[in-house]
Amino acid sequence: MTLAGDEPRVWLITGASSGLGRALAEAVLSGGGRVVATARGSSRLAELAQGYPGQVLATRLDVTDSAEARAAVSKGLDAFGRIDVVVNNAGYGLFGALEELSDEELRREFDTNVFGALNVTRAVLPWLRRQRGGHIVQISSLEGIAPIAAGETA
């Protein structure tokens, strides 16, 4: 998880407090990388930072807030000088019959899962271009590609 010259890569991971985001952050850190770990709640991020001193910047990020996305990127750049990999992992599933889901529920999910990823990507793209490199990883659900009807199993 290093660049040429053994410089550790810097990863910005959204939704890093639990699940896949947390597991990815721990894998990157155990491989010697650095992580800008973000989540709406910071208590579990503090544990991660304590376990890997100097390798983790734990910062709050509600991906639905474009100003918070820009602030998280800026904090990451201030702490580590670069960002090499961005993982848009924050998101959640909304389950139910379409006609039973409220407009508010649907908008909240789209704000997080779609526009949240766009907010983070737009915040980091200018820096990746200046660096002349980097990667953006988009985590999504199979349900977005091949949804199953209620009651069916995959």
Image (cartoon, rainbow, N blue to C red):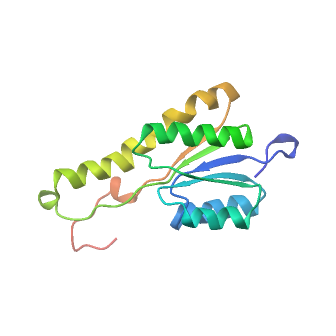
The residue depicted at 31 percent of the width and 52 percent of the height is 109
The residue depicted at 48 percent of the width and 53 percent of the height is 139
Q: Quadrant of residue 44?
A: bottom right
The residue depicted at 64 percent of the width and 68 percent of the height is 47
Visible residue check, residue 44: yes
Say which of 144 and 29 sits in front: 29
Residue 144: % across, % down: 34, 53
Residue 11: % across, % down: 65, 48
Quadrant (top left, top right, bottom left, bottom right) of the C terminus: bottom left
Q: How many marks?
A: 0
In this view, which residue lies farthest toward the left?
99
Q: Quadrant of residue 65?
A: top left
Residue 137 horizontal side relative to residue 81, left or right: left
Residue 24 horizontal side relative to residue 149, left or right: right
Say which of 150 and 2 sits in front: 2
Say which of 92 and 46 sits in front: 46
Residue 18 horizontal side relative to residue 63, left or right: right
Residue 135: % across, % down: 62, 40
**In this rendering, is residue 70 above or below 100?**
above
Residue 77: % across, % down: 67, 38
Residue 65 horizontal side relative to residue 71, left or right: left
The residue depicted at 29 percent of the width and 61 percent of the height is 94
Visible residue check, residue 83: no
**In this rendering, is residue 120 above or below 13?**
above
In this view, which residue lies farthest toward the right?
5
